[in-house]
Image (tube, grey):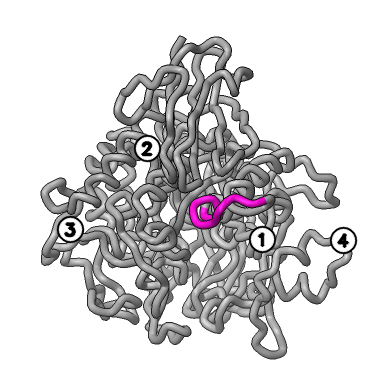
Amino acid sequence: MKKIGLLSLFFGGILSLNAQNITLFPTNWFVGMKWNNVQVIVKSDDSSIHNSSVNIKYPGVQLKKVHQFENGKYLALDINISPSVKPGNINIVMSNKGKTIVAQWPLKAKRVGVGKQFAQGVSSKDLVYLIMPDRFSNGDTLNDKYYGYKDTLVSRIDPIVRHGGDLQGVIHHLDYLKELGVTALWLTPVIENDMPLKREQAGMMAGYHGYWFTNHYAVDKRLGGDLAYKKLIDAAHVKGLKIIQDAVYNHVGIEHWFYKDAPAKDWINQWSEYTNTNHRNEPIFSTIGSEADKKIMLDGWFVPHLPDVNQRNPYVANFLIQHALWTVEEFGIDGWRVDTYKYCDEAFMNSVNETLLKEYPSISIFGETTANSVLGSAYFAQNNLATPFKHNVPGVTDFPLNGAIIETLNRPMGWTDGVTKLYMTLAEDIMYKAPEKNCIFLDNHDMERFVSVIGEDLNKYKMGINLLLTLRGIPQLYYGTEIWMKNFKNPNDGMVRLDFPGGFSNDVNNKFSVSGRTEKEQEAFDHVQKMANFRKSSEAICSGKTMQWLPKEGVYVYFRYTNQESVMCVFNTSEVEKTIDLKNYVECTKQYSHATNVINGADLGNNFIVKGKESIVLSLKK
């Protein structure tokens, strides 16, 4: 949103200030964009603005059409920007009842370095670190409270209200992240959440997590605002770190004008009485499912204070697509994680993805699809399935693989249980067009903490990290997992979103520093760091092929390999030690004579023992 300083021009030639508050969406645009037919939403306090005649005079810019809405406070302007247009300020002249209002709409120069300096995308060569800014580090205490907002409560005692972390806090710890081996940051949404506390099952909750949008065109001031976000992205890029932004197309906060003062009722999915989504993805792709179940899944609301957005409305679709393009260009982000992907209109999602990739071919997109099966997960990505509707998003958050990893660590091997589940899940990669573009993870901000799920077992921890950092896909590490942060969602989600120790000025211990960590925390950190930095130099892991062997007596072996390199990954999920001989895996070992442990450099020869509940990642040598 851009608040415009306006002048009223009376036809007698006298200028006077106009008290009207007009905002334009998008706030500005850029020359040289492939998306050069821009639909500008004009929002006014004046309920008769829709009766205005509109005129634009700017070389190479043409007003094609003016749209009215049932809410007279709005107009939509279809504006064509020719390739030859120069940067500058476009005057949008709106005349009504003898009064003329002039609003400036800037055209900026397009960023340089697409695909190299921004919109770089993330791939299986990267390690993504997921941060919830409010809980990571407080770098500027002056922005903890913003008194223009509806929620000014800050209390680190309460896990479901704001704690004061911000973007400056992330900037302060970029060196820590780079040292760890991270190459990209995914932040939970930074967009403005000007919402009061809202009642959920956990109690009176704040929008500290960022998923309650109230203004798409502003970064939340409690995080530092637009300037802090640009500063973070610039600083990250200087250090070779990429930035992934969290998109939310499915819903907005109930204080958003989409709901409170919408141009038309059909901007939000309406029901005769409150209807919650059923959260089931199966009705979307099932050929025998009911349309009623599908509608509830797609159009039902998450909670009463999160109105469900109607992306089938062409004005809404344009608004959201343009905002995505604008964000990449305005801030210089490198990729998108799309929240609640499976709840969105399918044709709309294909449209926004296609538009982003056309404008920024190297940008990455992965959708959050909490699917219950590999089939359900693959359906929402580019796939090899024969389905009537084909999704085009390159990758998804791989929940089936996550479930299989946890099964491997926590249950003994059976015909379909334990490590066999992992083998089976990976065997079903044939459904995906590019499984290496899926985001893989051990936990995230919506899940129980990984360390707690595995019973605080260090051997299981190392096994999980080894799987995360050697399997195909784009690995994502949740903040604090590297220093043994733990907890269950008891009594609420806030317990798995606790503050990073040392990120706040009054913390007793600073876990960003070696001196502040316990022996176990340091051992966990060291393992992540060594594996993360090894994988950076391993072409086999970053972009090689995978070959897996059937688990036997609890032992699971797979290889990541290229013509020049082979990495052997061994996981003994049984309680007893096992002997591993390279000759039993001749398809991947015939040209190699011995194996070296990538963590400690020990040469294990061609025959070695793996202890019970132990995992080893090996670099094969000729």
Q: Earlier in the sequence, mark 2 or mark 1?
A: 2
- Amino acid type indicated by mark 2: Thr
Instruction: Name the residue rendered at 45%, 51% in the picture.
Output: 245
Judge left or right: residue 505 versus residue 302. left
* Foreground of the two, 332 or 368: 368
* Residue denoted by label 4: 287
At 44% across and 50% down in the image, what residue appears? 106
Q: Secondary structure at mark 2?
A: loop
Q: Tag on residue 502?
A: 3
Q: In this view, which residue lies farthest toward the front?
A: 576
Q: In the rendered structure, which segment of residues is drawn in magenta?
A: 406-414
> What residue is drawn where x is 65% and y is 59%?
371
The residues bearing labels 4 and 2 have C-alpha atoms spaced at a distance of 41 Å
Determine which residue is flagged by label 1. Answer: 372
Please say if 524 is above or below 136. Answer: above
The reply to whether residue 79 is in sight is no
Q: CA distance from mark 2 to mark 1?
A: 30 Å
The quarter of the displayed image where residue 206 is located: bottom left
Would you call the spot at circle 3 few (<14 residues within 10 Å), some (14-19), or many (20 or more)?
A: some
Disc 3 to disc 2, C-alpha distance: 22 Å
